[in-house]
Image (spheres, grey):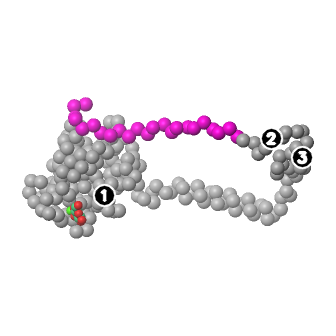
Amino acid sequence: MTNNIMPAVQTPSPKQIKGEQPVTPLCKASSPTQRCRLAPTNTSPPRPAPVTPERNTQTSMLLLLCCLGLALGAVSPSADHEVKLERGSCPMFWYSFNGRCYKYIATRVSWADAELYCVSQRANLVSFHSADECSFVKSLIKNFDPAEGHTWIGLSDTQKEGAWMWSEGSEVNFGLWNPDEPNNTGGAEHCVHTNYDADSRWNDCLCHVTLPFVCVSRTVCP
Ligand code: BGC
Ligand code: CA
């Protein structure tokens, strides 16, 4: 690779499996006549309880609760509008959405260094052109950063105050600003990050702040 910014590859380390502790018996029989405390005195096998209508009802209720639990577990991801991540025809570590490839990079860098890294990958900082695309990138970030922290996107007004441009050069036809943003605090906020609040909206911010970021591949044709 020719880039000088190495992405943090988060490889889960294998779990340490500790050796099991030897099972300590309740007590040791020091003589054949000594019994362990709480040991059953009746050695004949227990007889099964007779099947009654009440028992049948209890069994049905248990089965119903099990099925309900399984059903609830199965729907949980869609409740948060999470989008399934698929590599599709994208390179390793990139994920596919609507014909473009996206990559999350956990290394914290300035907006300019983030853009330079994306360019070194024949990509740009991510741009957004629909709410669906925002949902996809939100899921991508959450997959690597469950806390959904601030993350650079490709929007800036570094060339002219208030003239927002995507670094990839596409038209700015979609916005998801946090209420009261962009506010250009101190007259010096020219770069944009997402995940400013629980709704994953945008905030303009100082460009030298260091954050993780998302790259998107370029479209071949305009
Ligand atoms: C403001 C943001 C600003 C940030 C800078 C916040 O209090 O609401 O607009 O970008 O401070 O740290
Ligand atoms: Ca701001």
Which residue in the rendered view is the most extreme toward the bottom?
Answer: 180
In the rendering, at what x and y percent does residue 38 appear?
A: 82, 51
Say which residue appears at 83% left-offset and 46% top-offset.
36
Say which residue appears at 64% left-offset and 60% top-offset.
65
Alpha carbon distance from label 1 to label 3: 65 Å
Say which residue appears at 40% left-offset and 52% top-offset.
146
**Mark 1 highlights which residue?**
195
The quadrant where ligand 1 appears is bottom left
> Is residue 100 left or right of 169 when viewed as pictured?
right
Instruction: Write down the region rendered in magenta.
Output: 1-23
Sequence-first disc among 2 and 1:
2
> How many C-alpha atoms fall within 10 Å of the one at disc 3: few (<14), some, or many (≥20)?
few
- Element marked by disc 3: loop
Alpha carbon distance from label 2 to label 1: 61 Å
In what quadrant of the picture does the N terminus appear? top left
**Mark 3 highlights which residue?**
43
Specify the amino acid type for callout 1.
Asn
Q: Quadrant of residue 20?
A: top right
> How many C-alpha atoms fall within 10 Å of the one at disc 2: few (<14), some, or many (≥20)?
few
Q: Quadrant of residue 10?
A: top left
Alpha carbon distance from label 2 to label 3: 19 Å
Q: Quadrant of residue 203?
A: bottom left
